[in-house]
Image: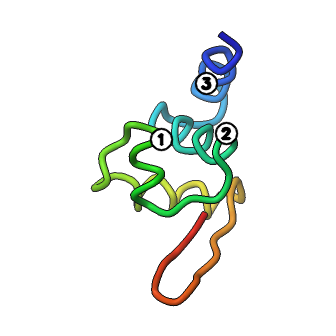
Amino acid sequence: MVESNILDTLISNLMSERQAKVYLALLKNGEAGPSELQRASGIPLSKISETVNFLLSNGYINARKVGKKKFY
């Protein structure tokens, strides 16, 4: 219930539904790579990069690179 209310608030004020779902997945699960974000948010992997770029460019999240992998 609380998660649904937060999602609705983010969507109505700040983000698209896709962006809000990825953001909430990170808040809930902590640091994650693209595959983990896809599983946690239900957003197609083909859209994760675009969504993460929006969140990064607007200062909602940070990125960290370990070897060739990126974590958000």
Q: Is residue 24 above or below residue 31?
A: above
Q: Which mark is residue 7?
A: 3
Mark 1 / mark 3, whichever is N-terminal: 3
Q: Tell me the residue at 51%/58% (across/down).
A: 52
The alpha-carbon separation of the residues under discs 2 and 1 comes to 9 Å
Q: Give yes or no for contact between labels 1 and 3 (Cβ–Cβ under 8 Å).
A: no
User: Disc 1 designates what residue?
Assistant: 40
Q: Position of residue 8 (x, y in %)?
A: 60, 18
Q: Give yes or no for contact between labels 2 and 1 (Cβ–Cβ under 8 Å).
A: yes
**Would residue 36 be found to the left or right of residue 9 on screen?**
left
Q: Which mark is residue 53?
A: none
Q: Tell me the residue at 60%/44% (across/down).
A: 23
Quarter containing the N terminus: top right
Q: Position of residue 69 (x, y in %)?
A: 48, 79
Q: Position of residue 21 (x, y in %)?
A: 52, 36
Mark 3 / mark 2, whichever is N-terminal: 3
Q: Residue furthest top?
A: 1
SS type, badge 3: helix
User: Disc 2 designates what residue?
Assistant: 28
The alpha-carbon separation of the residues under discs 1 and 3 comes to 14 Å
Q: Amino acid at mark 1?
A: Ala
Q: Nearer the viewer, residue 28 or 51?
A: 28
Quarter containing the C terminus: bottom right
Q: Is residue 29 above or below residue 63?
A: above
Q: Which of labels 3 and 2 is toward the front? A: 2
Q: Is residue 9 above or below residue 55?
A: above
